[in-house]
Image (tube, rainbow, N blue to C red):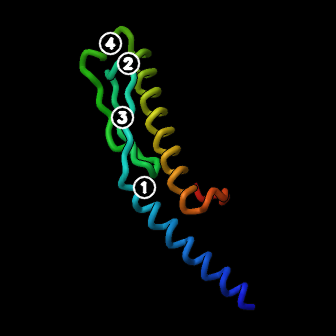
Amino acid sequence: MSSLGKMIKQAARLQQQIEQVQAQLAQRTVEASSGGGAVKVVARCDGTLVSLKIDPQAVDPADVTLLEDMILSAVNQALTQARDLANAEMAKVTSGFSIPGLM
């Protein structure tokens, strides 16, 4: 039974570490841009968007599709960077073990 108790203590310690990393990641941000900087997006590493900036010169009423594409590109880049950073930080805590549903 002592090995079971040890395992439970390790799991509790791991859970604490995961919660700490998640709290830290919620404060960290990444930035991505597209269109040569015409669209800039800042995202938190918890997967939320912080800001979206659009250069007024990028707004062309005749070509809204281009602006939409630049926005989507920048948002997707920022979210990918945030997810990659979060996964890397979590891998440090979990020693590379994949825990389903964690991130």
Number of the front mark, 3 or 1 = 1
x then y, percent, for residue 16:
50, 73
Query: Dot 4 lies on which element?
Result: helix
Residue named by callout 4: 61
Label of residue 35 in the image: 2
Distance between the Cα atoms at labels 4 and 2?
Answer: 16 Å
x then y, percent, for residue 90:
54, 57
Query: Dot 2 lies on which element?
Result: loop
Which amino acid, by three-letter code, is at mark 3? Val
> Considering only vertical position in the picture, is 47 above or below 67?
below
Residue named by callout 1: 25
Mark 2, residues whose alpha carbon is within 10 Å: few (<14), some, or many (≥20)? some
Taking the spot 50% from the left edge, 54% from the top edge, the residue there is 89
In this rendered view, identify the residue nearer to me: 83 or 9.
9
Residue named by callout 3: 41
Distance between the Cα atoms at labels 2 and 1?
Answer: 28 Å
x then y, percent, for residue 100:
67, 58
